[in-house]
Amino acid sequence: MDNSVPGIGSSPYGNEEYTIGWVSALPIEMAAAKGMLDEEHGDPQTPPQEADHNTYLLGAMSGFKVVIACLPKDELGASSAAVVATGMLFTFPNIRVGIMVGIGAGIPHYDDDDETRDIRLGDVVIGSDRGSSGVIVYDFGKRLPDGSFENIYALDRPPRTLRTAVAKMEAEHQTRENRICQYINSMLDKYPYMRKKGFAYPGSSYDQLFRETYRHTGGRSCAACDPTQQIHREGRFDTSPEIHYGIVATGSAVVKHAPTRAQIKQRHGAICLEMEAAGLINNFPCIVIRGISDYADSHKNDQWHSYAAAAAAACAKELLEFVQPTALDAERKAKDCLRKSLNS
C-alpha cells in the first residue's frame, strides 16, 4: 500500500528521529497543524507497514520533529483515534509523547464570578486537573442508589514532561499574552487561501450564547433566534483567544443539548466536551488541547470550526516551546506504554 503524499518527497530524517506524535480528528485540524509547522519534511523514509493505514505529515515545530496523522474521513470517536495512534507508534518507534489537538465544545460557567471560566468561541482548553488525567469519560459509569453518578473509567495522566510544560506556559502567561494570534497570523500569511476557508477570526458578533432552556429557531444561523434569550457577557479587551485549564469530558456522541451540557458540567466540573480522547490516553501518553467551536447546544454550527482548529494548533505549538528536550528524551517510548496497555 502506498500512503505517500503526492508532490512531496521523502523526509531527510529517519522515522526513528521523530519524537512528538500529533493526532487530529478532522481534515481542518490537520490543515491547521500543517500551518503551524516551521518546516515540512515530506513522507516517511520507511513507509508504513500494511497494518498501518495512516497518511502522515512530517515536519519540525518549536525545535521538535513532529508526526501528524488524521482520523479517516467520517470515522470519528475513541476507537478510530486508538487505531490511528497504534499505527503511528509502530511506524515511528521513538515517539515519546502525543498531543490530541482539535476542536471541542465549550461549557461556559457564566453563573460564576470566576473569569477563568468565561469560555468564548475560539478560546482553547487544555485538559488539566490536579491529581487526575484532566479528561473524564462522562457516559461510562454507574448510577448509585442515592441518584449520584460514579465514573468507573480511569484515564492516565499526561506525561510529566507535558505537565511540566503546561505549568511553565501557564506561569509565563501571567507576564505576557499567549502567542495564539501571532501564530495564526503567520499561518495566514504563509497560506493566504486559508482565509477563504474560514481560518481567520470570524468576529465576536457571531459568538452568541443562549440560555439553556432556549432552543434554536430557523436555519443554520441564529438570525431568527430571539435576541432577548442571549446571555449578556462583557466584551473583551481584545480578540485574542484565552487558554483555559480544566477538565475535558469525552463521550461517544456529539452533544447538541444545553441541559445535557449543564448536567455534565454539574456532575464533573468539565469545561469542554469532545469525542476522541478516551481512545488515546491509556494507550498513548498524551495531552488533550481543544479549540472551542460551539457551546454543545441546539445552536451548534460550523462557522467557528476552522478558526478554533487553528487556535488549538497554535496553542499546541506554543506549548512545545516549553518542553525540555532532555526531559522528553528521558520519557519512555510511547510504543512501550502501548504494549503494556495491550498486555494488561
Image: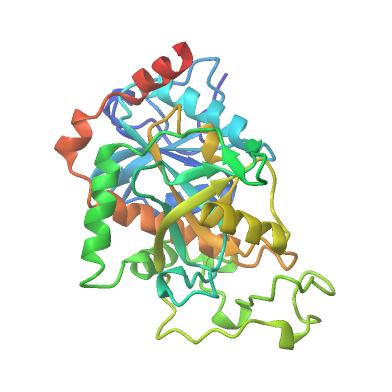
Which residue is the extreme one toward the right? 218
| Residue at 54 percent of width and 36 percent of height | 278
Whether residue 17 is visible, yes or no, is: yes
Give the image quarter of residue 47.
top left
Residue at (23, 73) in percent of width and height: 176
Residue 227 image point, x, y percent: 73, 87
- Please state the horizontal and vertical placement of residue 133, each as a whole percent of the image: 41, 41
The quarter of the image holding the N terminus is: top right
> In this rendering, does residue 54 appear at all?
no
Give x and y (percent) for residue 281.
Answer: 45, 34
Residue 314 lies, with reference to residue 114, above or below; the image says: above
Left/right of residue 263 with respect to residue 38 in the rendered view: right
- Count up the numbered dots: 0
Q: Residue furthest front?
A: 146
Along the line of sight, the residue nearer the viewer: 114 or 29: 114
Q: Quadrant of the C terminus?
A: top left
In the shown orientation, is residue 2 left or right of residue 76? left
* Image-based side of 183 in relation to 293, left or right: left
Q: Residue furthest top?
A: 343
Above or below, comparing residue 328 to residue 164 in the picture: above
For image coordinates 62% across by 65% down, the residue present is 295
Q: Between 194 and 21, which is closer to the camera in this rendering? A: 21
Front residue of this view, candidates 116 and 176: 116
Residue 151's spot in the image, x, y percent? 56, 38
Residue at image location 30% in from the left, 53% down from the top:
319
